[in-house]
Amino acid sequence: MSKNLFVVGTGTDIGKTYVAGLLVKKTRELSPRAAYFKAAMSGNSRRADGSLLPGDAVAVREMSGIDQPLAEMCPYVYEDAYSPHLAAKLAGQPVEMARVLADFDQLAAAYDYVTLEGSGGILCPLRHDEERFGVADFVKARGFASVLVADAGLGTLNGVGLTAAYMRAAGLRLKGVIFNNFQPGNVLHEDNRVMCEELFGLKALACVQPGDVDIDMAAAELAALYE
């Protein structure tokens, strides 16, 4: 049975997929049986045959070097670049939580480490019709531990603080923050790293610089995050 870690973002376009790819790559140092999973993926292009190409899954596979089949990586793939609940509604293909959980459980039985990525932020809805659930419900359903990806620049404190407060109130476990687009020596970036720990009690787990192809974290330290 796999050990798992959920990657949450303070919002969309924060760099969750990039960081997830680096994490998957790093877990390969712990075991070659490393995998990636995202419940619902929006904003995807079509192949020549008309089928949808799961862009985030492709990016993670290329970055990490895993050969996991794309079909295993995301059960719901949508074309429109909207929140999954809306993209699903327009496509007439609603997200079914039972399928998401079943697909994940099958993956967990086949791999040693699974890095999961959320859609948007922790409050992103996956379905909103006669059934209503979102990213937080998926995290809670399997009790995943999470790490939070935040941009290192302006607005970080508010986004990190609100996300952490919500997750704690909801009983979701947050192990720390990974800063993306970090520039060493940048006074704002350096201060955000310190303040997130002092204000919110969140450890800075890693700082990812633009163009990094590896995450600056020892394999043993990374392994401790996965449960």
Image: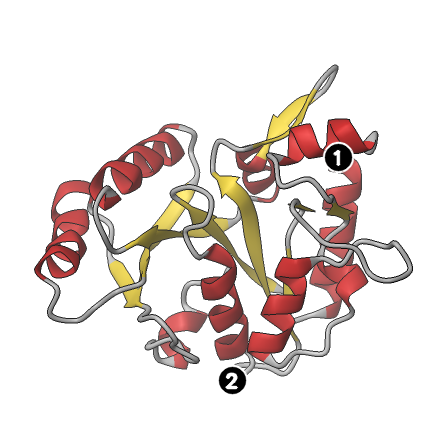
Dot 2 crowding, Cα within 10 Å, few <14, some 14–19, many 20+: some
The front one of 54 and 201 is 54
Q: Earlier in the sequence, mark 1 or mark 2?
A: 2
Q: Position of residue 73 (x, y in %)?
A: 71, 60
Would residue 155 appear left or right of 30 to someone viewing this image? left
Could you say which quadrant of the image residue 160 lies in?
top left
- The amino acid pointed to by label 2 is Glu
Residue 185 sits in quarter: bottom left
| Foreground pick, 201 / 216 | 216
Residue most toward the top? Answer: 130
Provide the residue designation for mark 1.
95
Asked if residue 203 shows in the view, the reply is yes
Which residue position holds label 2? 29
Quarter holding the N terminus is bottom right
Q: What residue do we see at 44% from left, 51% from top?
A: 146
| 81 lies left or right of 157 | right
Residue 217 horizontal/vertical position (percent): 34, 76
Count of marks overlaid on the render: 2
The x and y percentages for residue 5 are 51, 58
CA separation in Å, label 1 and label 2: 33 Å
* Left or right: where 160 falls relative to 79: left
Q: Quadrant location of residue 71?
A: bottom right
Badge 1 amino acid: Val
Residue displayed at 57% across by 56% down:
116
